Image: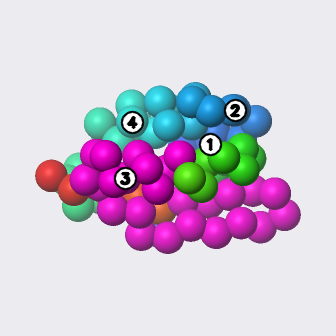
Amino acid sequence: MADATLDAKGLNCPLPILKARKALKDVNDGGTLEILATDPGAIADFQAFCRQTGNELMEHSEDDGIYRFLIKKVA
């Protein structure tokens, strides 16, 4: 279970990333943020986001057009 969830369904790049960056500010170090998105480009975007920020992309999946990402905030 994630510490926080961000519903970014219906938003296109770069909005899911921008909203995730903002939402992660409210997550404690070591905590997790779940993001739900419908933009297929979000897969590459969140992989790059985590590489650049040092946060950990713990998992991602797709179910019926909904992409789910679980990011662990690293201090």
Residue marked by disc 1: 7
Q: Amino acid at mark 2?
A: Leu
Q: Which residue is mark 3?
A: 50
Q: Position of residue 51 (x, y in %)?
A: 34, 54
Q: Callout 3, which amino acid?
A: Cys
* Residue 21 marker: 4
Callout 1 secondary element: strand
Which mark is first along the chain, 1 or 4?
A: 1
Instruction: Decide which of 3, 22 is in the foreground and name it.
Output: 22
Marked residue nearer the N-terminal end (1 or 3): 1
Q: Are marks 4 and 3 in contact (CB under 8 Å)?
A: no
* Residue 34 against residue 24 in the figure, above or below: below
Foreground disc of the pair 3, 2? 3
Q: What is the three-letter code of the residue carrying label 4?
A: Arg
Give the alpha-carbon distance from disc 3 to disc 2, as whole Å.
19 Å
Q: Check residue 36 for magenta coloring.
A: no
61 magenta-colored: yes
State whether residue 3 appears in this view: no
Mark 2, residue position: 11
Magenta-highlighted residues: 45-69
Mark 2 and mark 1 in contact? Answer it, CB < 8 Å. no
Amino acid type, label 1: Asp
